[in-house]
Amino acid sequence: MQTTLKRPIFTHALWHQCEQVYSQNPSAYIQLQDSYQVNVNVLLLAQYLDQKAFLLSAEQWQSMLAVIEKWEDSVLMPYRKLRRIAKRHLAEDEYQKMLDVELIMERKSQQLLLQKLHLLEGKPLTSPRVNNNVNAYLGIYGLDGSSL
């Protein structure tokens, strides 16, 4: 007998929960981003889906990355690099404005990820410690959940 998965309803509200998780240890996420090019939004989404017992395959995680790749490579990443360079040359309020713009760009990435998520079929998460979304996603970078 095949197990059917009651698909969770995914709304933009999930990003609020992801931001709460991020705020508990932002430096760990930024370190993974800077050291391994891990996408923080995708990692937070993987953690969220683990909580919802909605498992995606490594191939599906690759497709999630593909959805945001052009946007992030051509707009977000160059802007982030510029912001980091400009930090030492700007007043704090000017730098904060740059951070605010980057957050708007991050929201665009989140929107693209959510649209893609609605198209994917997940499986029930049966073994949260071994076979989970965090490990599937981080495995793309040769990492696992212990990296967090």
Image (cartoon, helix red, strand yellow):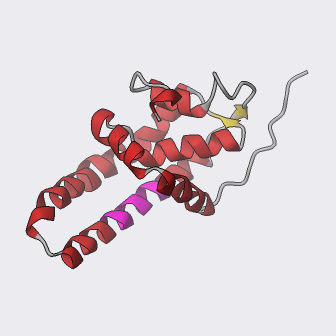
In the image, taking residue 145 as reference, residue 50 lies left or right, namely right
x, y percent for residue 83: 19, 61
Within the magenta stretch, is there residue 104? yes
Residue under the image location 49 percent in, 25 percent down? 144
Question: Residue, x 55% and y 33% (percent of image)?
Answer: 134
**Total marks drawn?**
0
Tell whether 117 sits left or right of 29.
Answer: right
Task: Mark yes or no: residue 95 visible.
Answer: yes
Considering every residue shown, the one lying at the far right of the view is: 1
Region of the chain picked out in magenta, as a range: 102-111
What is the chief secondary structure element of the magenta stretch?
helix
Q: Is 77 left or right of 33, judged from the image as shown?
A: left
Q: Residue furthest left?
A: 89
Residue 30 at x, y percent in the picture: 35, 46
The answer to whether residue 59 of the structure is visible from this angle is: no
Q: Nearer the viewer, residue 68 or 138?
A: 138
Give me the residue at 58% from left, 46% from top: 117
